[in-house]
Amino acid sequence: MRVVMCVVMMVVCAPMAWGQAVTGFVGGNEYDSYYGSVGGDVVGWRFTVTTALNISDLGVWNADQTGALESSHQVGVWDESQALMASVTVESSGTVVGDWIYASITPVTLNPGQTYTIGVSYASGDDDWYISSATSMTTDPSVTWTGSCYPAAGDMGFVYPSSDSGSYGRFGPNFLITVIPVTLMTFTTE
C-alpha cells in the first residue's frame, strides 16, 4: 500500500516579499509630540498580521523629506502583553526607503492572531513630525492597522503607549518586513 503525506513547513531561512508596513497616507496634521513634552512622548499604531512576518528594520517618517532627521528617535515594537520585542535608535544616517529613514534590528517574527504595537519617541521642539488624523492610509496586504496609540501622560520616556485612538494617525513609526514563505513538502511511503 502506498501512502502520500503532505507536510507544511515554515522555512525561516528563505524570506521573500520585502516591503514597508505603511506604504502611504493622505492628509492629517503634523505634530512634534503628543503632550508637548520635552522629555519625549511615544506615539504609534497597533496592528495585526495575516501571515507570519519578519521585521528587519524600524523607521521614522521624514516629514520634510530631505533625507535627514533633526534628531535621533527611539523606535520599538511591543507584543500584546506590552513586552518590548525590539527597539533601535534611528539616526539621519539610516537607510532611506520612501518617506522613512530606517535602522536595522535583529529580525523579529510576528505571528497571525496577535496584536502588536509600534511606537516612536518624539520630543517637543525637535523639528521632526508625525501625522495624526490622516484621511486615508495604506499598508502592505499582510499588515492590518487596528488603531493609533499615545502615552497615558507626558514626559514618560520610552514606554509602551497605552492610550488608544480610532483615527488614522500617529504615523511616524514604520517597519520593513519580509513574508516567511510556506513550503509544501510531499513524502511518499510504501
Image: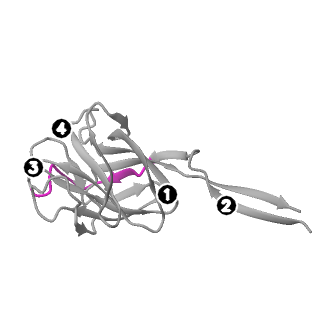
Image quarter in which the N terminus is found: bottom right
Image quarter in which the C terminus is found: bottom right
Return the disc, 1 or 2, that comes first in the chain's sequence. 2
Please name the amino acid that badge 1 sits on: Pro
Q: Residue 178: image x %, image y %?
A: 50, 48
How crowded is the residue under tag 4: few (<14 C-alpha within 10 Å), some, or many (20+)? Answer: some
Q: Which mark is residue 39?
A: 3
Q: Is residue 135 above or below residue 20?
A: below
Nearer mark to the viewer, of 4 and 2: 2
- Distance CA(mark 3)–CA(mark 4): 13 Å
Please name the amino acid that badge 3 sits on: Gly
Q: Secondary structure at mark 1?
A: loop
* Residue linked to disc 4: 71
Label pair 1/2, CB-CB below 8 angstroms: no
How crowded is the residue under tag 2: few (<14 C-alpha within 10 Å), some, or many (20+)? Answer: few
Identify the residue at horizontal 49%, vertical 58% (top origin). Answer: 142
* Residue linked to disc 1: 141
Q: Residue 88: image x %, image y %?
A: 29, 43
* Residue linked to disc 2: 8
- In the image: residue 183, left or right of residue 15: right
Identify the residue at horizontal 42%, vertical 67% (top origin). Answer: 114
Q: Nearer the viewer, residue 142 or 110?
A: 110
The residue segment tinted magenta is 20-35
Please name the amino acid that badge 4 sits on: Ser
Label pair 3/1, CB-CB below 8 angstroms: no
How many badges with numbers are in the image?
4
Q: Residue 136: image x %, image y %?
A: 34, 59
Return the disc, 4 or 1, that comes first in the chain's sequence. 4
